[in-house]
Image (tube, rainbow, N blue to C red):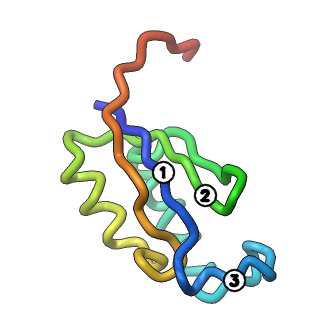
Amino acid sequence: MYHVVLRQSGPEFDPALPLEEQSGIAEHAAYMNKLVHDGHIVLGGILPNLRTAHAMEAESEEEVRELWSRDPWYASHLILESIEPWDIRLDSR
């Protein structure tokens, strides 16, 4: 099952700094790469207004929440905004 996850910047994210200079970026990036490698993140990226969007594959919303809770940036640099189930009808893969 797929889910669309939106997150917004948290209290420790400094909008004056580029992403590569944020505190804890190496640990956050390593965790995100693990989610991709493990097949949980299908697509992901940055939206305007310091928000992120990810298409994730997981059994349930609870699994998605549990995966995000392990992110070193959880609640500090990124705050979970919403998780929505996604019924994909079109796929060019």
Asked whether disc 3 touches disc 2, contact meaning CB atoms under 8 Å apart, the reply is no
Question: In the image, what residue occupies the spot 80% across and 81% down?
Answer: 16
Residue assigned mark 3: 14
Marks 1 and 2, how far apart in space?
A: 7 Å
**Quarter of the figure that contains the C terminus:** top right
Residue assigned mark 2: 51
Across and down, in percent, residue 34 comes to: 46, 61
The three-letter code of the residue at mark 1 reads Leu
Q: Nearer the viewer, residue 91 or 65?
A: 65
Marks 3 and 2, how far apart in space?
A: 13 Å
Question: In the image, what residue occupies the spot 69% across and 83% down?
Answer: 14
Left or right? Give the position of 72 relative to 9. left
**Quarter of the figure that contains the N terminus:** top left
Residue that extends furthest to the front in the rendered view of this protein: 49
Identify the secondary structure beneath mark 3: loop
Identify the secondary structure beneath mark 2: strand
The three-letter code of the residue at mark 2 reads Arg
Vertical placement of residue 27 versus 68, above or below: below
Asked whether disc 1 touches disc 2, contact meaning CB atoms under 8 Å apart, the reply is yes
Sequence order check, earlier mark of 1 and 3: 1
Vertical placement of residue 39 versus 27, above or below: above
Marks 1 and 3, how far apart in space?
A: 19 Å
Left or right? Give the position of 84 relative to 18. left
Question: In the image, what residue occupies the spot 54% across and 83% down?
Answer: 11
* Other residues around mark 3 within 10 Å, as few (<14) / some (14–19) / many (≥20): some
Across and down, in percent, residue 12 comes to: 57, 86
Residue assigned mark 1: 6
Sequence order check, earlier mark of 3 and 2: 3
Q: Nearer the viewer, residue 24 or 34?
A: 24
* Other residues around mark 2 within 10 Å, as few (<14) / some (14–19) / many (≥20): some
Across and down, in percent, residue 67 comes to: 31, 61
